Image: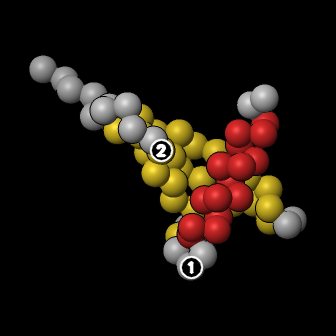
Amino acid sequence: MIIKEKVVHFYKWQVKGEQIQVIGLQGTGGGGLTFSFYRGKEELTEGKADLTKAFVTELSNQKK
């Protein structure tokens, strides 16, 4: 038996002239996405709340 537990979304985001890879994890319970941000292989943890807010704002504006 195979049980699907998570959905993964991959994004490339251009911010201030640099490219950031964004990984969004979504649980199967219908909750929101949890985002992780990377520059190359380095995870960006400092200022993650601000990055998340800016990314979600731009993503929601793009879908309109």
Please name the residue shown 56% across and 79% down the image: 46
In the rendered image, the quadrant that contains the N terminus is top left
58 sits to left or right of 37: right
Q: Tell me, yes or no, if residue 16 can be seen here.
A: yes
Asked if 31 appears above or below 18 in the picture, the reply is above
| 3D distance between C-alphas at marks 2 and 1 | 19 Å
Percent of width and height locating residue 3:
21, 26
Amino acid carrying label 2: it is Leu
Asked if 41 appears above or below 53 in the picture, the reply is below
What residue is disc 2 on? 33
Asked if 9 appears above or below 1 in the picture, the reply is below
Q: Tell me how the rendering is colored.
A: secondary structure
In the image, farthest residue toward the left: 1
Percent of width and height locating residue 64:
78, 29
Q: Tell me, yes or no, if residue 38 can be seen here.
A: no
What residue is disc 1 on? 46
Residues packed near mark 1 inside 10 Å, few (<14), some (14 to 19) or many (20 plus): few
Foreground: 50 or 7? 50
In the image, farthest residue toward the top: 1
Element type at marker 1? loop
Please name the residue shown 57% across and 43% down the image: 10
In the image, farthest residue toward the bottom: 46
Residues packed near mark 2 inside 10 Å, few (<14), some (14 to 19) or many (20 plus): some
Asked if 8 appears above or below 46 in the picture, the reply is above
Element type at marker 2? strand
Percent of width and height locating residue 54:
71, 58
Q: Earlier in the sequence, mark 2 or mark 1?
A: 2
Please name the residue shown 46% across and 51% down the image: 34
Do the numbered discs 2 and 1 sit on residues whose CB atoms are within 8 Å? Answer: no
Amino acid carrying label 1: it is Glu
2 sits to left or right of 16: left
Foreground: 19 or 6? 6
